[in-house]
Image (cartoon, coloured by chain):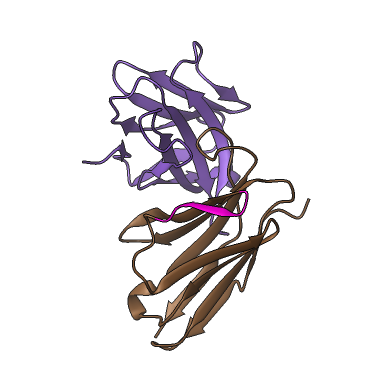
Amino acid sequence: DAGVIQSPRHEVTEMGQEVTLRCKPISGHDYLFWYRQTMMRGLELLIYFNNNVPIDDSGMPEDRFSAKMPNASFSTLKIQPSEPRDSAVYFCASSWGSGGYYEQYFGPGTRLTVT
Amino acid sequence: AQKITQTQPGMFVQEKEAVTLDCTYDTSDPSYGLFWYKQPSSGEMIFLIYQGSYDQQNATEGRYSLNFQKARKSANLVISASQLGDSAMYFCAMREGESYNTDKLIFGTGTRLQVFP
């Protein structure tokens, strides 16, 4: 199995630009999670989906962030417009069954730098 | 208030020795779950071990074991016979009980472990 795939691995953009991060979960997994990791705030859950439906987006910092999961094999996290404080590593994770009971499989992350 | 506390920002251990990474948690719910994840320098998070609050025995997975002390609300990770490849960040995480969203994990701030020869 290829594991969770994220693209791009690195993204450098200028403030005000739109950024789209992509994730392909492990086939058969029914939960998908988007996390953000920074030195200041640690690892934060932004949003998660169950069977392609957003369940909890309470961690999304503001309206500039949006996430979609059009099908079971693809999800996007979009930031528009981006700001320097959005610089972080963004992880996608998937699990078979609830992520609170079962192992979450993490992707390699996307390192976003907004200048 | 912190739900998950990892008080050791960094730990050093010599190869082949055992090391304990501390984790304390805070919840009033009797049903919860505790996880440990490893994050090597390559960045990806790797699941290590899980302990449910009702589990009678401490969880073990190979060289990893979880020292679960319910009354103290601690769930320390013990790594036996450390290897150089164990050098990484280690995160403790908790799933709260039925009163909360049980799909979500709350992560601690992590402990950086360095294993030296």
The one nearer the camera, A56 or B24, is A56
A15 with respect to B27 (left or right): right
Instruction: Please tell me whether residue A55 belongs to the stretch shown in magenta.
Output: yes
User: Residue at 32% of width from left, 31% of height from top?
Assistant: B24
Q: In purple, which chain? A: B
Q: Position of residue B30 (x, y in %)?
A: 36, 19
- The foreground one among B60 and B104 is B104
Residue A37 in picture, x, y percent from top left: 42, 60
Give the answer, above or below, for where A114 lies relative to A39: below
Farthest-out residue, right: A1
**Residues rendered magenta in the picture:** A51-57
Q: Position of residue B31 (x, y in %)?
A: 40, 22
Based on the displayed image, in which of its 4 quarters is residue B19 positioned?
Answer: top left
- Residue B101 seen by the camera: yes
Chain shown brown: that is: A
Report whether B103 appears left or right of A71.
left
**The N terminus of chain B appears in which quarter of the rendering?**
top left
- Kindly identify the residue that appears in the image at 33 percent across and 24 percent down: B29
Q: Is residue A105 magenta?
A: no
**Residue closest to the far left:** B1
Instruction: Judge from the rendering whether residue A85 lies leftward or rightward of residue A5; answer left or right.
Output: left
**Residue depicted at x 70% and y 59%:** A73
Say which of A6 and A79 sits in front. A79
Is A65 rendered above or below residue B5? Answer: below
Image point (56%, 65%), residue name = A68
Q: Quadrant of the C terminus of chain B?
A: top right
| Residue B6, x across and y down, in percent | 33, 39
